[in-house]
C-alpha cells in the first residue's frame, strides 16, 4: 500500500461483550493534522472504540490501520511505539511516582540503554537519564506543572492529574493522540486551559482524536465530528453539519448539554 | 529525587564503615575482643554471612515484589538451584566427566558460579514470561508451585537416580572452598569479607536499577499496568526480565552458600525457606533495597534472641516455643507495620515531622493572640 | 480476513473451556496409562489406583471447600487451613488416649467432636485476633498473617505432640492396623468408606447450608458483592469469622477421617493444604462444585502418576498441574458468572 492520505483508518470495527454488541461495524478516517471528535450519549461505545484502537481490548472483527499498517494484532505497548498515545477516561496516573517521573515513564521509548548499563550505572545510562529528565521537565513546563515536579502524582488536584496525563502522553512524541474525555470533571478555568493546550498540540502538528462530552469544547476545536449512538455511527461531518443532523438531535433529545448549544 | 539518592549514598557509606569496622575487629582482634564477645554471642560472623547471603537474594526479591508488585513464593527454588549448580559442578565434576585438570583449577568454581547465574536466570525468564501474566493470588500460587517442583526434583535426583547428582535427601558434601589463585577464601573472616563485598555490590546494583528506566517502569506497571502499557512499556517482558534478574541473584547467593557450608541438602530450599524469604522481605520493607539487609538482620536477630531469652524465661522450653513466638511476632509486625520496618519507620518519621511542623505553625499563629 | 476464523476459534475455545476439566483429565489419564504400559498393569491395578486415589481426592475436596469458603467471603488465601487439618486428628488422638484434662479417656466420637469444636474456636480466634485488625491491608499482608498463624499453630503442635507420628485407630475396628476387605478383586480399606461417607455428608450439609439457610444466603451475598451485602444490612465482618469457622470444621474433619490411614504428625497439614489449594484453584477459588470435582480428580490422577513413575515424584504432579492450569487460565472463562470475587 502506498503512503495513504489518512493517518488512521478504522474499518468496520466491531466489538461484542458476551452477546452485547458494544460497537457495530464502525468506519471512519482521520486525516493527518486534524482534530477529530467522537461524540455520543453515554454508553454509545466511545471509550470501547478507544480501547480497540489503542490495543487495550481485542476487536471482535474489523481492522484499524495506522499509516497504512494494520494494528489489530499488536499489543498496547507496540501500538504506543507506532506513535499513538492516549489518555484515559478515568484518570490513570502513576499515583506513587512523582509528577516528573510520570512524564519520564512517558519517555520510556526514547531510552535505549540496557539493563547492564542500568545495573552498573554506566555513563551512557547516566547521560540518557539526564536528557530524559530535562525533556520531561520541558513537557511539564509546557503544561504548567513544572513547579510540582517532585511531588507525588497523587497529591495533584483532579484537573492537574488530567493535565499530567496529557503531558505523559505527549512525552511519547506521538503522531496521533487519543484524548478520552479530557474535560470531564474540570472547572471552567481548567477547561479553558485544556482548550488552549489542545490548540497548541494542533499547532505542533499532532493529530488529535477526541472523545468529549463538553460540547462547547468540541464544537470550538474539532475539524470533523462523528456521532455514535448505541455502538453505531449515526453521523459524520463538520461540527456545524452534525449539530443540525436530525438523527443526532433525536439521539441527544433530552440531553441538556446539546440542546443548550 | 536528588535527596533520595543522597540518602542512599549516606546509607551506603554507613554500611561500608560498619563492614570495615567488623572486618577490622575480626582480623586484628584488638585486646582479644571479637564481634561475638562484644555482642554477648548475639552477632557472630557466621550469622552476618547469612545476613549477607539473604541480602543478595532479597535485593532481587524486593525488586520483584516491592517495586514490580509481583509476588514470588518460590524464590528459594532459585537459591537452591544456584547452590546445587555449584555443588554438583565442583564436588561431583568427575561424575559428569569433567576433566580433573579443569575441575581443580581455582577459577573453575567462579566460572560455575557465573554459569549458574546465567542458567538459573535464563530458566526464570522462560518460566516468567507466561507465569508473570498472572496476577495477585494466582501468581503467588504459580510461583509456589515452581518452588515445590524444583524442590522435589532436587530431592529426587532430578529423576536420574543412577547419576546421583543431587544426592537425594543427603545432598552434596565436600564442596571445595573458593580460591583466588593459591589464596583460599577461608577461614570464616575471609569469607565474611567476600560475601559482604558481593552483597554491597548487589545493593549498589539494586539501587541503580531502581533509579533507572527499568526501576521506573516497574514502579509504573505496579501502580497502573494499563497506563504503563499505553506509554510503551512492554510490561510482560519487563516483569520477566526483573524476575530473571532476581533469580540470577538468588543463584549467586546459593553458590556462595554452597561454598560457605561446603555441603548442601535439598531440605534447605523448600517451601519453608521461600516463606521465610517473603517474611524477611516484608518485615524489612518490600519497596526498599535497604529493607533487604535490615529485614534479614531483624529476622535472624529475632530468632536468636527468642531462642536465648526463652531459655532464660522458660528453662524447660525446647526450640518449639521459638516457632510459636516467631509466628505470633510475624502477625503482630504485619498488623502494626504492614509496610515493613524501613518504609514503615520512614512513614512514621514523616508523619511525626509533619505533625511537629503543624504544631509549630499553629503556635506561631496563635501566640500573638495569647492562646496557648 | 480473520472474521470467520476468530469467531470459530472463539466458539471452540468456549466449548473447550466448559469441559476443560474433563478434557484435561482424560488426556492426562491416557498419558498416564501409556506411561504405565511398561509395567503390564491390568484393569484391576488401574481400578485400584482409582480407588486409592479417590480416598486422597475426597480429603483434597474437603480442604478445597475450606479454601473456597474463606476466599469467597474475605478474598484471603488462608494458609492456616493447613494447621486446621493437623489439629483435628492430633487433638482427637490426645482425647482418645488421655481424655480431657483429667477425665478418663474419651471415646473416639466424642474426642473427634471436641477436637473439631476446639479447632473451630481456634479458627475464629485466628480471624478475630490476627486478620480482623489487618482488614485494611494488602492481600499479601493478609496471606503473610495466615502464614504466621500456621507457623505458630504448627510450632505449638510440635511443642505438645513432639515430632513423631501418632496413631489414630481406625473408626470401625478401633485397631491401629485398619482392616480391609476385598471387593471385586480390589482391596478396600474400611476407613475409606468413612472418608467417602464423611465427605459426601459434609458436601450435602454445605449445599443445604448455602441454599436453604438465611445465614448461608447472606454468606453467598457477601461473596458476590461485599459492598452491596453490607448495604443490605449483612454484617460482613461476622461472615468473615463464620467462613473461618467453617474452614476450620472442614479442615479438621478432613484431617480426622484421614488420620487412621496416615500417621498424623505436627507437620502433616501443609502438604494437604497445598493439594487442596490446587483443587480449589481449578474453580478459580470461587467455584464450590469445580473445587470438589477438582479435588477428586487430583487425588485419582496423582495416584495414577505415583503408580507409574518414581514414588518420590508423587508431589510433583499436583504442582505441575497447578502451573499448567494457571498458565492456561481456563477458569477465566468460567468466571463470566457473577460469582467472580474482586479481592480488595
Image (tube, helix red, strand yellow):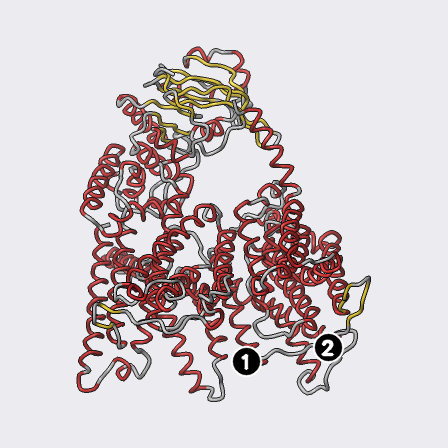
Q: Position of residue C156 (x, y in %)?
A: 55, 77
Q: Quadrant of residue C331?
A: top right
At 58% across and 74% down in the image, what residue appears? Answer: C266
Q: Chain of mark 1?
A: C
Is A220 rendered above or below residue C245?
Answer: above
Q: Chain of mark 2?
A: C
Residue ID for mark 2? C177
Furthest residue toward right: C184
- Quadrant in the picture for the C terminus of chain B: bottom left
Can residue C238 be seen here? The reply is no
Is A174 rendered above or below residue B288?
Answer: above
Q: Position of residue C21 (x, y in %)?
A: 65, 47
At 46% across and 55% down in the image, what residue appears? Answer: C138
Q: Which is in the foreground here, disc 1 or disc 2?
A: 2
Distance (Cα) linking label 1 and label 2: 27 Å
Q: Secondary structure at mark 2?
A: loop
Can residue B146 be seen here? The reply is yes
| Left or right, residue C221 beside residue B121 | right
At 33% across and 80% down in the image, what residue appears? Answer: B42
Q: Secondary structure at mark 1?
A: helix
Q: Position of residue C340 (x, y in %)?
A: 59, 46
Mark drawn on residue C159? 1
Q: Position of residue A104 (x, y in %)?
A: 28, 40
| Left or right, residue C20 beside residue B232 | right
Upstream in sequence: badge 1 or badge 2:
1
Disc 1 residue crowd, few under 14, some 14–19, many 20+, Cα 10 Å: some
Disc 2 residue crowd, few under 14, some 14–19, many 20+, Cα 10 Å: few
Amino acid at each position: 500500500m502506498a503512503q495513504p492520505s489518512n493517518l488512521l483508518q478504522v474499518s468496520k470495527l466491531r466489538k461484542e461483550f458476551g452477546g452485547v454488541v458494544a460497537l457495530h461495524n464502525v468506519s471512519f478516517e482521520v486525516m493527518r493534522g486534524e482534530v477529530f471528535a467522537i461524540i455520543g450519549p453515554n454508553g454509545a461505545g466511545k471509550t470501547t472504540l478507544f480501547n480497540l484502537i489503542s490495543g487495550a481490548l481485542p476487536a471482535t472483527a474489523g481492522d484499524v490501520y495506522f499509516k497504512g499498517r494494520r494494528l489489530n494484532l499488536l499489543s498496547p505497548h507496540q501500538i504506543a511505539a507506532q506513535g499513538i498515545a492516549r489518555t484515559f477516561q478515568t484518570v490513570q496516573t502513576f499515583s506513587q511516582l512523582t509528577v516528573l517521573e510520570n512524564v519520564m515513564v512517558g519517555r520510556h521509548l526514547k531510552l535505549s540503554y540496557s539493563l547492564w548499563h542500568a545495573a552498573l550505572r554506566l555513563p551512557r545510562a547516566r547521560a540518557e537519564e539526564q536528557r530524559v529528565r530535562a525533556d520531561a521537565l520541558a513537557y511539564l513546563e509546557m503544561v504548567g506543572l513544572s513547579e510540582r515536579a517532585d511531588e507525588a502524582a497523587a497529591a495533584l488536584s483532579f484537573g492537574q492529574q488530567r493535565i499530567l496525563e496529557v503531558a505523559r502522553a505527549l512525552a511519547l512524541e506521538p503522531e496521533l493522540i487519543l484524548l478520552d474525555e479530557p474535560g470531564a470533571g474540570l472547572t471552567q478555568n481548567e477547561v479553558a486551559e485544556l482548550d488552549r493546550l489542545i490548540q497548541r498540540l494542533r499547532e505542533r502538528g499532532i493529530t488529535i482524536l477526541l472523545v468529549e462530552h463538553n460540547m462547547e469544547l468540541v464544537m470550538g476545536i474539532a475539524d470533523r465530528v462523528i456521532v455514535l449512538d448505541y455502538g453505531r455511527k449515526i453521523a459524520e461531518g463538520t461540527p456545524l453539519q452534525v449539530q443540525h443532523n436530525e438523527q443526532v438531535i433525536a439521539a441527544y433529545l433530552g440531553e441538556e448539554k446539546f440542546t443548550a448549544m | 529525587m536528588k535527596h533520595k539518592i543522597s540518602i542512599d549514598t549516606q546509607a551506603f557509606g554507613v554500611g561500608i564503615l560498619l563492614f570495615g569496622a567488623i572486618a577490622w575487629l575480626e582480623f586484628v582482634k584488638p585486646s582479644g575482643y571479637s564481634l561475638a564477645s562484644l555482642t554477648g554471642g548475639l552477632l557472630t560472623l557466621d550469622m552476618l554471612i547469612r545476613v549477607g547471603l539473604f541480602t543478595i537474594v532479597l535485593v532481587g526479591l524486593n525488586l520483584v515484589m516491592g517495586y514490580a508488585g509481583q509476588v514470588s513464593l518460590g524464590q528459594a527454588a532459585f537459591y537452591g538451584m544456584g547452590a546445587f549448580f555449584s555443588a554438583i559442578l565442583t564436588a561431583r565434576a568427575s561424575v559428569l566427566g569433567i576433566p580433573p585438570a579443569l575441575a581443580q583449577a581455582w577459577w573453575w568454581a567462579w566460572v560455575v558460579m557465573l554459569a549458574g547465574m546465567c542458567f538459573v536466570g535464563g530458566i526464570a525468564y522462560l518460566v516468567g514470561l507466561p507465569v508473570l501474566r498472572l496476577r495477585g493470588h494466582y501468581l503467588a500460587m504459580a510461583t509456589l508451585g515452581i518452588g515445590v517442583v524444583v524442590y522435589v526434583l532436587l530431592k529426587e535426583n532430578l529423576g536420574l537416580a543412577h547419576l546421583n547428582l543431587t544426592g537425594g535427601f543427603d545432598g552434596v558434601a565436600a564442596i571445595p572452598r573458593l580460591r583466588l589463585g593459591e589464596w583460599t577464601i577461608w577461614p570464616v573472616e575471609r569469607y565474611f569479607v567476600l560475601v559482604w563485598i558481593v552483597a554491597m555490590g548487589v545493593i549498589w546494583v539494586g539501587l541503580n536499577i531502581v533509579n533507572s528506566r527499568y526501576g521506573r517502569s516497574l514502579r509504573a506497571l505496579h501502580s497502573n499496568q494499563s497506563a504503563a502499557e499505553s506509554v510503551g512499556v512492554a510490561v510482560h517482558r519487563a516483569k520477566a526480565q526483573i524476575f530473571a534478574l532476581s533469580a540470577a541473584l538468588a543463584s549467586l547467593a546459593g553458590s556462595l552458600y554452597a561454598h560457605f557450608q561446603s555441603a548442601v541438602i535439598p531440605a534447605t530450599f523448600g517451601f519453608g525457606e521461600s516463606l521465610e524469604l517473603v517474611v524477611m522481605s516484608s518485615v524489612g520493607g518490600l519497596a526498599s533495597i535497604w529493607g533487604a539487609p535490615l529485614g534479614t538482620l531483624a529476622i535472624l536477630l529475632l530468632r536468636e534472641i527468642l531462642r536465648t531469652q526463652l531459655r532464660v524465661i522458660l528453662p524447660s522450653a525446647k526450640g518449639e516455643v521459638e516457632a510459636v513466638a516467631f509466628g505470633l511476632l510475624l502477625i503482630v509486625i504485619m498488623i502494626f507495620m504492614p509496610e515493613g520496618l524501613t518504609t514503615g519507620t520512614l512513614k512514621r518519621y514523616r508523619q511525626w515531622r509533619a505533625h511537629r511542623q503543624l504544631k509549630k505553625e499553629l503556635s506561631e499563629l496563635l501566640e500573638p493572640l495569647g492562646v496557648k | 480476513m480473520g472474521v470467520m476464523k476468530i469467531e470459530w476459534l472463539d466458539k471452540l475455545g468456549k466449548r473447550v473451556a466448559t469441559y476443560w476439566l474433563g478434557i484435561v483429565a482424560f488426556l492426562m489419564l491416557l498419558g498416564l496409562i501409556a506411561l504405565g504400559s511398561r509395567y503390564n498393569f491390568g484393569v484391576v491395578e488401574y481400578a485400584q489406583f482409582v480407588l486409592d486415589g479417590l480416598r486422597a481426592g475426597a480429603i483434597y475436596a474437603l480442604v478445597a471447600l475450606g479454601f473456597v469458603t474463606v476466599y469467597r467471603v474475605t478474598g484471603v488465601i488462608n494458609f492456616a487451613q493447613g494447621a486446621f487439618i493437623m489439629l483435628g486428628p492430633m487433638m482427637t488422638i490426645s482425647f482418645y488416649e488421655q481424655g480431657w484434662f483429667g477425665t478418663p479417656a474419651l471415646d473416639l466420637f466424642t474426642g473427634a467432636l471436641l477436637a473439631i469444636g476446639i479447632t473451630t474456636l481456634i479458627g475464629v480466634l485466628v480471624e478475630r485476633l490476627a486478620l480482623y485488625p489487618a482488614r485494611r491491608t494488602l492481600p499479601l499482608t493478609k496471606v503473610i498473617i495466615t502464614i504466621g498463624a500456621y507457623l505458630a499453630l504448627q510450632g505449638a503442635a510440635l511443642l505438645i505432640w513432639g515430632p513423631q507420628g501418632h496413631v489414630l485407630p481406625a473408626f470401625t475396628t478401633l485397631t491401629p492396623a485398619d482392616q480391609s476387605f476385598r471387593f471385586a478383586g480390589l482391596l478396600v480399606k474400611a476407613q475409606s468408606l468413612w472418608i467417602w461417607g464423611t465427605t459426601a455428608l459434609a458436601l450435602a450439609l454445605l449445599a443445604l447450608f448455602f441454599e436453604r439457610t438465611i445465614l448461608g444466603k447472606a454468606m453467598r451475598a457477601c461473596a458476590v458483592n461485599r459492598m452491596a451485602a453490607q448495604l443490605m444490612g449483612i454484617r460482613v465482618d461476622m461472615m468473615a469469622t463464620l467462613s473461618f469457622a467453617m474452614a476450620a470444621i472442614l479442615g479438621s474433619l478432613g484431617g480426622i477421617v484421614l488420620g487412621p490411614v496416615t500417621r498424623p504428625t505436627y507437620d502433616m497439614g501443609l502438604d494437604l493444604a497445598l493439594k487442596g489449594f490446587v483443587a480449589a484453584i481449578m474453580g478459580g477459588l470461587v467455584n464450590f462444585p469445580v473445587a470438589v470435582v477438582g479435588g477428586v480428580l487430583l487425588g485419582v490422577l496423582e495416584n495414577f502418576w505415583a503408580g507409574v513413575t518414581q514414588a518420590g515424584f508423587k508431589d510433583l504432579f499436583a504442582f505441575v498441574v497447578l502451573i499448567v492450569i494457571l498458565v492456561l487460565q481456563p477458569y477465566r472463562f468460567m468466571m463470566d458468572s457473577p460469582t467472580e470475587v474482586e479481592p480488595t
